[in-house]
Image (cartoon, rainbow, N blue to C red):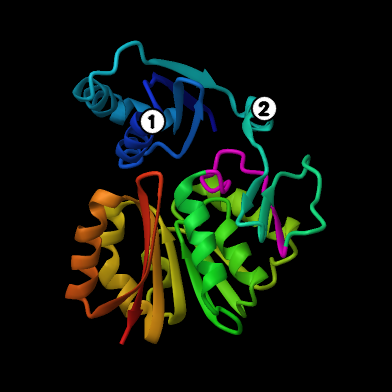
Amino acid sequence: MDYIELNIPVSDAEQAEILTAELSELPFESFVTEREVLKAYIPQSKLIDYKEDADALLRRYGVEGARYVQIESQNWNALWESNFEPVDVDGRVLIRAPFHASSPTAELEIVIMPKMSFGTGHHATTKMMVQMIVASDVRGRKGLDMGCGTGVLAIAACGYGAESMDAVDIDDFAYENCCENLATNGVAERVCAMLGDVSVVAGRSYDFILANINRNILIGDMDAYVALLREGGELFVSGFLEADVEAMQRAAAERGLVPHLRLSVDGWAALSFVKQ
């Protein structure tokens, strides 16, 4: 699969975060900020349908000088190796690539070869989701990682004692990458990776659900999440800005979910709710 890299000049980190949030509503799957350039990646096959929307979005924010560059599949690993640094989550969880050194002090190490899938731990939303896993008691519980990307959250949950996980993503490359990372981290027998949307797990039940996607999908699928949660189960969500917290809380309250945890980093937010 070939990808297109959209190079966007940005004035500061705040603008990069805002554009990342906006572009994530389109089929852009991964983002990297280097100095004053935001790099957003989208499958070449999808760009033809969404290029007009992306260009209109950039015009709306007054962005000039953006350009599209084709990235061939065989070049992706080299691209990530040049950008991917280990991620330390509060000194407790280390997310690293296979070519990084191990850490003797981390409670949990997660080895991720991200390729073209979202979820290296670098983004604030992924870090906050890992923080909520660490802060919650998932031991012996069954969970769902919805929109799993690399599978990093499912792997983290297993590392903190989850009995079993289902990991679901709609993208075929993300599914394949997730399977590889599950095997690398020795949790393939405890995590069932599935290709599809939330409908592929209809009728199942979970003690907790992890969903790091975006506001529109989270709200659109919230009825399904509630149906999948057992009584007393927890829903952990991120992938949206602090400005979207009120809308997320309102959607959750309308479905009988009670707020529990709230985290904010760099303008991004993460929330958890309990089904009562």
**Pointer 1: what residue?**
16
- Residue 242 x/y as whole percent: 29, 51
Task: Decide which of 161, 266 is in the foreground and name it.
Answer: 266
Q: Which residues are magenta?
A: 107-122
- Residue 162 x/y as whole percent: 60, 77
Q: Is residue 118 magenta?
A: yes
The residue type indicated by label 2 comes to Ser
Location of residue 208 by image quarter: bottom left
- Tell me whether circle 2 and circle 1 mark residues in contact (CB < 8 Å): no
The residue type indicated by label 1 comes to Ala
Q: Is residue 71 above or below residue 175?
A: above
- Residue 77 x/y as whole percent: 67, 32
Which residue: 61% across, 48% down?
Answer: 177
Instruction: Looking at this view, name the residue that lies furthest to the top.
Output: 65
Query: Quick check: can you spot residue 203?
Result: no
What is the distance, in whole Å, between disc 2 and disc 1 at their CAs? 20 Å
Tell whether 247 sits left or right of 213: left
Dot label at residue 190: none
Which residue: 81% across, 50% down?
Answer: 102
Which residue: 58% across, 51% down?
Answer: 150
Query: Callout 2 environment at 10 Å: few (<14), some (14 to 19), or many (20+)?
Result: few
Q: Counting residues from the N terminus, which is met first, the one under dot 2 or under dot 1?
A: 1
Task: Decide which of 175, 244 is in the foreground and name it.
Answer: 244
Quadrant of the image containing the N terminus: top right
Element under label 1? helix
- Residue 186 x/y as whole percent: 75, 64
Tell whether 165 sits left or right of 68: right
Query: Callout 1 environment at 10 Å: few (<14), some (14 to 19), or many (20+)?
Result: many
The nearer-to-camera label among 2 and 1 is 1
**Pointer 2: what residue?**
82
Main secondary structure found in the magenta portion: loop
